[in-house]
Image: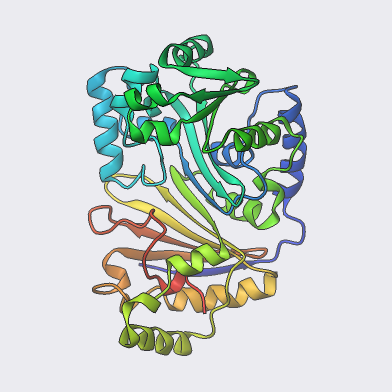
Amino acid sequence: MHRRLIVRAVLVPLLAIALAVALGSWASGRQPDTRSSLVSALDALPAGTLVAGFTDWAAIRDELDLGSASTAAARASLTEGASLRDLTTRSVLGGVVADMHVAYGWSAADLDWEVYGQAPGGAAMVARLDDAVSIEDVEDRLESIGYTRRGDVWTLGERAATEVGPELAATLGHVSIVPRQRLVVAADQAAYASTVLDTIAGSEPSALSVRPIADVAESLVGSDTAVVQSGPFACRATSLDALGDDVVAQGRAAVARAGALVAPTFTGRGLVDGAPTQTIRFVAAFDSPGRAAGQVKVRSALASGPFIGRAGRVEDSLDLLDATVDGSVTVLRFALDPDSAAYMSGEGPALFAGCP
């Protein structure tokens, strides 16, 4: 497979300007949100977000040729088909489609997109309902299930939690609805739900106000599913340390041949489905364009040969298509056989996406 290395120096990425304009317009409600689903989703999460997982449910339904997935059979096909192709690994709703539809009257099958973010202050899911779902019906069902409303936050009672089951209760314990944007917010704490609502309203900064997150998001636009992680999370997730001294020694030798690795500020992965192969992007943001230009050479050199910490060679599951730099961000794009491996958990040794 032909590989190409491209370095582009970008002094002032146009996305930063576009995001600033779009954010102000979207928060004010003056016009529809025309941004990509991933950008819209990350803009709903607070600035303190350290890990975020995104699922583009509308795109997945299209790719699986399920239409609106309005029948029980179609919803079952969505659950199975998306899971087999690693498209719902980042979702907190993908495994409870049938149960949620029975209890709540809607599910992941009725969403445009979903994002789940974790921060020191709490964890929250934000999802956009598609146009076929009635906001009034959603709120009526919350009341009938046994939620009580205080201000903008609906809280699930203990008896009702038993009826909906532990998984749904853990995810949907505190729920808020933002009718104008057709958003559902579910948080682990009522106070954090309020923080997310303030973020959506524009009175608190969003994750996109963090420049590395915005830069990583730009490189992942178009993904059917994506994960964004702060540097320390990504470094732990890709580490060889737990695999023994021999594996660590192999990794150090490989890095020594390729050049020194530098820890990124934020990383991301984004999967785009296709038949029969998929493409996956591994993205890393660094503190300067010069650092990124050096790192793309090191990381592309580590993207072939023995897959240290895993069986076989990197090429057995990941075929490097291109390695690029845009400003301070590196992108390695691979062709991926979904039957050979799954990478959207964000976990597992990977030197080309790792840290020193």
Give coordinates of residue 251: x percent, y percent.
Answer: 39, 83
Give coordinates of residue 185: x percent, y percent.
Answer: 55, 30
**Residue 340 higher or lower than 99, as above or below:** below
Q: Name the residue: 70% across, 55% down.
A: 211
User: Which residue occupies the foreground of this view, 15 or 167?
Assistant: 167
User: Which residue occupies the foreground of this view, 161 or 307?
Assistant: 161
**Residue 209 higher or lower than 335, as above or below:** above
Query: Relative to residue 296, is residue 326 drawn left or right?
Result: right
Please, which residue is most extreme toward the front here?
Answer: 158
User: Which residue occupies the foreground of this view, 80 or 17?
Assistant: 80
**Residue 67 higher or lower than 221, as above or below:** above
Q: Name the residue: 74% across, 39% down.
A: 204
Give coordinates of residue 56: x percent, y percent.
Answer: 45, 37
Q: Name the residue: 58% across, 54% down.
A: 50
**Residue 133 higher or lower than 308, as above or below:** above
Dividing the image into 4 quarters, which one contains the N terminus? bottom left
Q: How many numbered dots are placed on residues in this image?
A: 0
In this orientation, does residue 66 appear? no
Colour setup of the view:
rainbow
Query: Relative to residue 194, is residue 66 drawn left or right?
Result: left
- Where on the picture, by quarter, is residue 239? bottom left
In this orientation, does residue 309 appear? yes
Give coordinates of residue 229: x percent, y percent.
Answer: 53, 57
